Amino acid sequence: MLDLSLSKPSEIVKRLCERLRSERLSQQLTQAEVAGRAGIGISTVSSLEAGRNVGFENLVRVAMVLGRGKELENLFQPKLDSLEDVRRYEESAKRQRIKRRQDNA
């Protein structure tokens, strides 16, 4: 399990990139094979595995090739622990913008 609460963003990126590389290797795929299936360059796969600045869309493409798209679907799921959370979530889905708060100081 990846504990994000005590990590710096760079540490999280490094661990995720290591996992990405491990997943590719466990499936016995070369960087070239992943790149070809994802429709991106080999250097992009290499950069992604090294944790260098690569676009999110490319990460999604590689995750899909490796059969890990479901994990991305769960990335920003709403946290619904109570009926009040469900009600608030459903109301927020109707709104397009957050209302500005007024300070009564």
Image (cartoon, helix red, strand yellow):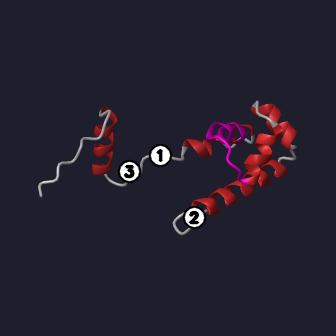
Please tell me the numbered disc located at residue 77. 1
Q: Residues within 10 Å of mark 1 (few under 14, many from 20)?
A: few
Query: Viewed as shown, does residue 102 lie left or right of 2?
Result: left
80 or 59: nearer the viewer? 59
Mark 3–mark 1 CB contact (< 8 Å) = no
Q: Secondary structure at mark 2?
A: loop
SS label for mark 1 = loop
Gap in Å between the C-alphas at discs 3 and 1?
9 Å
- Outermost left residue: 104
* Residue visible at 78% across and 52% down in the picture: 21
Checking the image for residue 8, the label placed there is: 2
Residue 22 picture location, percent across and down = 79, 55
The first of marks 3 and 2 along the sequence is 2
| Position of the N terminus by quadrant | bottom right
Q: Circle 2: is it few (<14), some (14-19), or many (20+) Cα within 10 Å?
A: few
For residue 6, above or below residue 23: below
Question: What residue would you read off at disc 3?
Answer: 80
Would you say 35 lies left or right of 76 here? right
The magenta-colored residue range is 51-62
Give the spatial CA distance, label 3 vs label 2.
Answer: 26 Å
Residue type marked 3: Leu
Query: Per the image, is 35 magenta?
Result: no
> What x and y, as percent, mark residue 83?
29, 49
